[in-house]
Image (cartoon, rainbow, N blue to C red):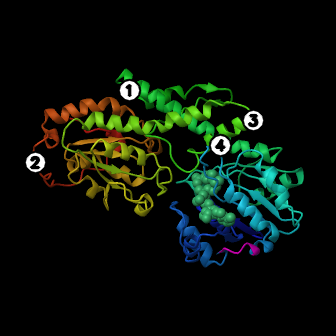
Amino acid sequence: MVADKRIGVVGFGYIGSVIGAVLANRGARVIGVEPSPRIRTLVAAGRAPAPEPGLEELVNAAVVAGRLEITDDPSVLSDVDVVLITVGTPLAEDGSADTSQLTGAVETIAPHLRDGQLILLKSTVPPGLTEKLAPILRGHANTLVAFSPERLAEGRAIAEFQTIPVVVGGVDPESTRAGVEFWRGALDVDVIQVSSATGAELVKLADNLWIDLNIALGNELAQICDRLGGIDVLEVISAANSLPKVQHHVNILTPSIGVGGYCLTKDPWFVHSMGKSLGLDLQTPRVSREVNDAMAEYSAASIDGVIGGAEASPRLAILGVAFKTDTGDVRYTPTLPVMKQLLDRGYHLVAFDPFVDREELGEFGIDWADSAEEALSGADAVAFFTGHRQFADLTPEWLRSKTWGHVAFVTRGWVDEFDSPGHRRGRIHRQSSCRSAARTRGHGAGLRPGRRREEPQPRSGPRPSAVPLHTARYPRS
Ligand SMILES: NC(=O)c1ccc[n+]([C@@H]2O[C@H](COP(=O)([O-])OP(=O)(O)OC[C@H]3O[C@@H](n4cnc5c(N)ncnc54)[C@H](O)[C@@H]3O)[C@@H](O)[C@H]2O)c1
């Protein structure tokens, strides 16, 4: 049972705070060890240190119940039963894993460990690192050391942490057993035992390489559909995915404006770098990264193909800036390179994202709005870059009534989450007809060079009934 456990969480960032808050709410006594004063202040006040839905409530409940504390003093770890290490492992300049936070944490905590404690490394690392660090973690005490990758996805982190199977591999059988036993008591999930820590490390990288590659496949299929014209890539993918293959199905993921976030943008490079260290010139990680990174330029060009062409600077409302649905995480968000490309093409961008802390993105030439309505006011077009759930309430009629050029389109794959047979990339094919429709009806007049732009007329009458946006992706003429 986790209720009788004292757990130390080293690194109380995005992942550490989710894990720590969930385990505390399941009855454990959790203490976070975190160097950032900002994070410590937030957590001590019962606030979430990461923009994850539901996290603030969990942190607050745990702090109020006295089951979650935070400190920068690693000596508190001598009093815990289990230590989870969740520090960052960013990408180094040379494309390898920068493991300095992890080695630093291990060296700092090692003198405070005691016999019998279980140390679980959860940060994503190149295979072999847990084996290398184990002697340090055992330098002062006879600890049990295992690797247990964190595989949750942001935006659904709290639910996923408590539902997806946990993988554990120890540096010896006793450590593996202890890791399996801990997770069985802590969460009601399947616990998958692998026979080495190195194998468990590779599991995480294999998962993320698969995801990145499959999105790359979806992105290239989308480009094929664009060139073919009139082919709905989501329909193609949905039908293709019906094919049973061994014990599962083909599972091509949905295309997007790019891939972002802390993990998918770096983990394939970890694999590539690991390959080099093993004398292998691995192609798949490099290709998936290159294909997905190139989507920024492709997406900006696609948008420009619809609403560009006029000499006046088009005003584009952007809804959603975070890299993922329902989070405010902007780390390596692909929306940023798309916006930069559009700025270079002379666009005036007004963005709204209810979850994003604008300070984190800094100044780069866009205007921020405080609501979708404000972003759309006077805009020639709107682009949905992140599929936050609240945007699903915006109807095509409402969008049409707010945008100047009467062009609305969606550029991010969120339709599946709303249970719709959507046409996300299909928009690319419809954009030209959409534009010509707007021009025929004179709606594009505001884009003509030399014409003074008038304010859109306020619309009266009741708001249209809530037609989910994805059921009518484009304004239909
Ligand atoms: N974010 C995700 O969606 C996700 C998902 C699965 C796995 N992961 C992996 O989990 C790990 C953590 O990711 P994250 O998004 O939480 O990163 P993060 O940067 O949000 O959090 C890492 C935290 O560790 C702290 N830290 C750094 N050095 C420390 C030290 N010596 N002692 C104690 N704390 C220290 C940092 O101050 C920071 O708060 C990474 O390896 C990442 O690849 C992340």
The quadrant in which the C terminus is found is: top left
- Per the image, label 3 sits on a secondary structure element best described as loop
Q: Are marks 2 and 4 in contact (CB under 8 Å)?
A: no
Q: Nearer the viewer, mark 1 or mark 2?
A: 2
Residue hosting label 3:
278
Residue depicted at x 26% and y 52%: 376
Within-10-Å neighbours for mark 1: few <14, some 14–19, many 20+: many
**Mark 1 or mark 4, which is nearer the start of the sequence?**
1
Q: Report the quarter where the N terminus lies.
A: bottom right
Q: Is residue 384 visible?
A: yes
Q: Which residue is mark 2?
A: 452
Is 449 above or below relative to 62?
above
Number of marks? 4
Observer-side mark, 1 or 3, equals 3
* Magenta extent: 71-75
Q: Earlier in the sequence, mark 1 or mark 3?
A: 1
Closer to the chain start, of discs 1 and 2, is: 1
Secondary structure state at the residue bearing disc 1: helix
* Picture quadrant of ligand 1: bottom right
In the drawing, what numbered circle is on residue 368? none
The residue carrying pointer 2 sits among few (fewer than 14), some (14 to 19) or many (20 or more) residues within 10 Å by Cα, namely few
Query: Could you say whether the residue bearing mark 4 is in a helix, strand or loop?
Result: helix
